[in-house]
Amino acid sequence: MNPLLLKVNERTYDMLVNYIRTALALKMDKKAVTAIEYALIAALIAVVIITAVSTLGTNISSTFNKVASEL
């Protein structure tokens, strides 16, 4: 077998083992999972607030323009 190919396979194997260990460690860490959940909830709330403020701003702007044109 090609020695270079064997070294690449060993490096790939080591990288995969390290990746799996890290993934399992993060999965076992409840604080990390909780932090990610809170971050997702905060992002969702931010999107809702931005959408609401944008819609409200457009409605208020059109109302003021309508009042201004009536005057």
Image (tube, rainbow, N blue to C red):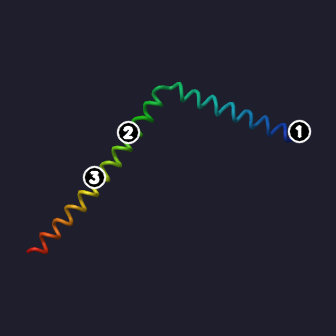
Residue at mark 1: 3
Say whether disc 3 or disc 2 marks the residue closer to the N-terminus.
2
Q: Quadrant of residue 68?
A: bottom left
CA separation, marks 3 and 2?
17 Å
Residue at mark 2: 41
Left or right of residue 41: residue 13: right
Q: Amino acid at mark 1?
A: Pro
Q: Quadrant of residue 35?
A: top left
Relative to 25, is 40 above or below? below
Relative to 56, is 12 above or below? above
Q: Residues within 10 Å of mark 2 (few under 14, many from 20)?
A: few
Image mark for residue 52: 3
Q: Amino acid at mark 2?
A: Ile
Instruction: Name the residue rendered at 16%, 67% in the picture.
Output: 64
Q: Residues within 10 Å of mark 3 (few under 14, many from 20)?
A: few
Question: Nearer the observer, disc 2 or disc 1?
Answer: 2
Q: Amino acid at mark 3?
A: Ala
Residue sticking out furthest to the left: 71
Say whether disc 1 or disc 3 marks the residue closer to the N-terminus.
1
Residue 49 in the image, given as x and y percentages of width and height: 30, 49
Question: Nearer the observer, disc 1 or disc 3?
Answer: 3
Instruction: Name the residue rendered at 45%, 27% in the picture.
Output: 31
